[in-house]
């Protein structure tokens, strides 16, 4: 830092927005509206109320809340109060939420009433939580239930001069986001002001956010702080439309009513959008940033037919959400639909504000350095990342931080290949890979092959026990219901595209797939059922 | 910085571009082309050649060059070699260039042959310059003149492994740009890697640079490193079209040939564009970032009629070029042409990556803090700026740095007012203000009033001696030649718009106005003529 330098912080974006466009509508939540002036004032009021309630520098403030204006405001108010935001996945069990509150040491828990009540009734312990705050409903209603402090009561404590929209050190922790913890306890991923600022700027560029942006909150804000979009749309002076429970009919009515230009989400959001009864050609161009898993060619084609375009991004909680983008190349437009979909389904290259996306071997060089796999699209390795948009570390877990950052790069646990054009393709989560007769089979590769069949809507492939090969792939399939398909045809369809040994041994047609709160398929649940008759599970 | 953080540097943008779009055309210079792969290779070759030629960490490398591919490559290669780029205004006198070379302590001077030869012949001394490098012509030709080392000969020294696209400390000096020095010696403004990186990202957002961008170099690259656009277009994966000598006919042929989407410059560029014989409606939407002075309503209307849009930015050498932008508001579109032009001609608000734009009083508060003027559009004060996109300081001039940064903000020497919508309007350079009967008269205000007359193309107002009032404004006017106008009508036109005492005492019709190399009008020259009969000049 030199004499006139200022530490980077995304809270500054709201100060600027309120100065430049005070009267513009910044937040829409049901019938309620906040202009940028009101947004900034609300953030100041909440920040001062938090300080008055005893929140001190670096103290954690937890939220268990749907995508409300109040949670969005907290993304600015908590760091403005020099606190640390812990936005918790609302669909976790009371025991998990209890663990996160205690591990983070949060002193206050703010939440929707229907989320707080089950926590209180569960018997789970919340030893660090000194105060429970009931947030308003979408209509602004607060019951004032005896167990909880009303949000209005909290805000009434606000006093004194406005706080400064700045931070004394840009490496300070702004937020802690807990991993989904499918293997072991959730880990608390620390985000710095610097990292969030830079990832927000990267998101603005790759999503083309500007003043005209009207962003619909289909992605949970508790998921990597909404991929830093909470801050990015404010920086771009756009409008954010809160959305508390994603359902097909309301999604379409919000898109139409507010002329939505952008939304983010996992492929399940695309599926919901496309298969809704209300689906119709879009009046306003819509850009969808898709993450979590690559969209299938069928879905890509259906989304495009509506007039929407897809930006395919990849990242993890540890990378502030998006780290890489499948930067589209003009020449791809000349390809047929399948080839185009195949290329855009890749995880791509580091974003403008990120470093390289690498795929490395398991073993280090004699000098202790990471070794890149061949750029042949074949050799599988682990995807690693580093730079300003990779976490500071795991909160109160130096050991896990050290293990995850061997060689100075963050190890994702994702397996992929590097293509000859420098684009990375994710093949599988390390824990999902099927090891069959000593060969690695990427479940994603099998899934993509199945999804290219027009009768198939969604699919999950997991390894199931096999006496001869150890494991074999099995597919769980949801059909579109518009075309017929049976097990034999599905298997033949896969074999026509990829090596026969990768084809599923069995195909089970199901009505639904089990999913996490962020739309990822819970393969562990599918595996558990299949392996329950076996003495031990191999891949947990 | 935390464990996995990487220091910010704009040279990283080229590494990324070469990885993501190696085969895309990045630079066009005459008939020569560089893909991003070739651009990155050229930067590596030059950087290694500089190291092999003895350029050490932090050493200055000077360029006196037109807008060539070689100067653009140097913007990456010199910092890659851990050197500091000093891009010198090509239109300065040999004595001035000699001063800059000696003050910066540059050990090498690279330049176009027709710029180097007059320097050698001038007799000016270049004691620190150990080697003179002749850059290729637009055709790639190098004479190999005995006095100079050919660029090819320099490049041939390149050896060893590629250098890393990174910097060990983001606050290191990347470039030194010398002020035009209308008052006293030019000062060397130090840019850091951090500041250039952030200003480039800000430019990408406000100019909407993306993959489809084709940028024409009408702005000299030696002017604030081309407002950091040298780095920004690479970050956005766009194409840069070099342009060595701006002339109306070639400007239009380049715009048509390359479907130019963006160009930058002072209002003189707009005038050249609009008044060219070749002017015609644009086939590709063109965005022009205009700085240096606000464009007149007449010019704005003419530019729009061609199908181009204007982004009005403001800044100084000390702020990496653009610091503020007149962020357009949707509601302005409902205004008539004159009101729209009046609002967009303002200097606006800090960019997305900048801090606030303030206007402050001359005196500090009792606590030594800067005091903002009233937000009434009337009270005049000095425009001040701070943050990451304000210089590190003046090279080898701590005294000037201290004076320029009183109260922790950079003092621009520009006078302005703050409007009630939070937008700043520049009224005048402090040294240009006319003080008439104790009243400050903004020469820009008088100029804008004159420019609203359809017969007037360009104008400069300066203070001239007056026995009664001390000074009075005088206008030098270039007409469009398409309509008649005389002195009396011009003066009456001003009086119809602003206070009578601000109207010029005299109007002189001229064929041309004297200008700096960056298109700014040399008011000092006009003043000198007028004051030459007087014993002393008041405003120098």
Image (cartoon, coloured by chain):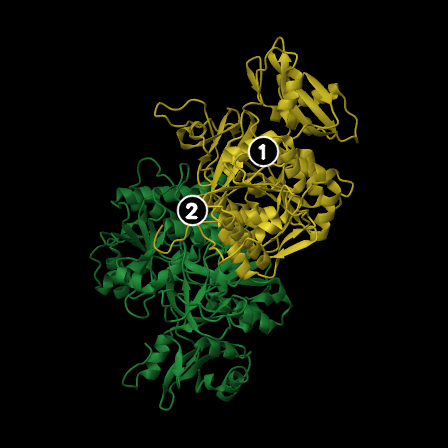
Chain colours: A yellow, B green
Relative image position of residue A434 (x, y in whole percent): 59, 19
Tell whether A139 sits left or right of B81. Answer: right
Position of the C terminus of chain A, as image quadrant, is: top right
Residue closer to the observer: A37 or B321:
A37
Relative image position of residue B262 (x, y in whole percent): 52, 57
Residue closer to the observer: B39 or A320:
A320
Relative image position of residue B127 (x, y in whole percent): 20, 57
**Cα–Cα span, label 1 and label 2:** 29 Å
Q: Chain of mark 1?
A: A
SS at mark 2 in the image: loop
In this figure, which residue is indicated by the disc labeled 2? A170
Of the two numbered discs 1 and 2 in the rendering, the one whose residue sits closer to the viewer? 1
Which residue is found at the position 51% from the left and 48% from the top? A201
Which residue is found at the position 55% from the left and 24% from the top? A183
Q: Is residue B211 visible?
A: no
Relative image position of residue A96 (x, y in whole percent): 58, 30
From this view, report whether residue A414 is shown above or below residue B230.
above
Q: Check whether the beta carbons of the residues at disc 1 and disc 2 lie within 8 A of each other.
A: no
Q: Is residue A20 visible?
A: yes
Work out which residue is located at the far front of the displayed protein and give it: A146
SS at mark 1 in the image: helix
Q: Chain of mark 2?
A: A
Work out which residue is located at the far bottom of the displayed protein and give it: B468
Residue closer to the observer: A253 or B451:
A253
In this figure, which residue is indicated by the disc labeled 1? A97
| Labels 1 and 2: the sequence-earlier one | 1
């Amino acid at each position: 830092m030199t004499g006139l330098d200022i530490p980077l912080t995304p809270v500054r974006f709201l100060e600027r927005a309120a100065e430049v466009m005070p009267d513009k509508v910044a937040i829409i939540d049901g019938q309620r509206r906040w202009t940028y002036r009101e947004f900034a004032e609300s953030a100041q009021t909440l920040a001062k109320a938090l300080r008055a309630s005893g929140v001190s520098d670096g103290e954690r403030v937890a939220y268990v809340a749907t995508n409300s204006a109040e949670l969005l405001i907290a993304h600015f108010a908590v760091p403005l109060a020099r606190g640390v935001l812990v936005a918790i996945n609302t669909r976790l069990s009371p025991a998990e939420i209890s663990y996160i509150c205690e591990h983070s040491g949060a002193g206050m828990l703010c939440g929707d009433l229907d989320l707080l009540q089950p926590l209180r009734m569960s018997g789970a312990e919340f030893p660090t939580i000194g105060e429970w705050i009931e947030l308003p409903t979408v209509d602004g209603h607060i019951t004032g239930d005896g167990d909880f402090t009303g949000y209005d009561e909290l805000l009434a404590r606000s006093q004194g001069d406005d706080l400064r929209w700045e931070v004394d050190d840009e490496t300070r922790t702004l937020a802690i986001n807990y991993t989904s913890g499918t293997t072991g306890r959730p880990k608390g991923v620390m985000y710095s002001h610097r990292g969030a600022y830079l990832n927000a700027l990267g998101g603005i560029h790759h999503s083309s956010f500007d003043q005209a942006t009207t962003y619909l909150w289909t992605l949970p804000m508790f998921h990597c702080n909404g991929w830093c979009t909470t801050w990015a749309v404010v920086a771009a002076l756009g409008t954010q439309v809160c959305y508390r429970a994603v359902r097909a009919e309301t999604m379409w009515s919000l898109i139409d009513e507010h002329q939505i230009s952008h939304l983010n989400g996992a492929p399940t959001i695309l599926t919901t959008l496309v298969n809704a009864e209300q689906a119709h050609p879009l009046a306003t161009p819509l850009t969808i940033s898709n993450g979590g898993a690559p969209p299938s060619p069928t879905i890509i084609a259906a989304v495009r037919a509506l007039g929407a375009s897809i930006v395919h991004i990849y990242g993890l909680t540890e990378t502030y959400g998006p780290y890489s983008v499948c930067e589209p190349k003009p020449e791809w437009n000349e390809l047929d639909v399948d080839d185009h979909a195949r290329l855009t389904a890749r995880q791509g290259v580091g974003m403008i504000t990120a470093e390289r996306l690498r795929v490395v071997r398991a073993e280090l060089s004699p000098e202790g350095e990471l070794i890149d796999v061949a750029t042949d699209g074949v050799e599988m390795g682990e995807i690693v990342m580093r730079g300003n948009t990779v976490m500071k570390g795991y909160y109160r877990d130096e050991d896990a931080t050290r293990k995850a950052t061997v060689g100075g790069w963050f190890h994702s646990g994702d397996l992929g290949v590097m293509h000859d054009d420098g684009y990375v393709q994710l093949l599988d989560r390390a824990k999902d890979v099927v090891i069959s007769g000593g060969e690695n089979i990427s479940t994603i590769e099998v899934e993509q092959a199945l999804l290219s069949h027009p009768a198939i809507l969604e699919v999950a492939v997991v390894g199931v026990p096999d006496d001869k090969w150890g494991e074999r792939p099995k597919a769980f399939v949801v059909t579109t219901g518009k075309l017929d398909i049976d097990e034999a045809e599905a298997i033949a369809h896969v074999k026509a595209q990829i090596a026969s040994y990768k084809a599923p041994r069995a195909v089970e047609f199901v009505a639904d797939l089990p999913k996490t709160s962020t739309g990822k398929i819970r393969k562990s649940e599918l595996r558990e059922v299949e392996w329950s008759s076996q003495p031990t599970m191999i891949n947990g």
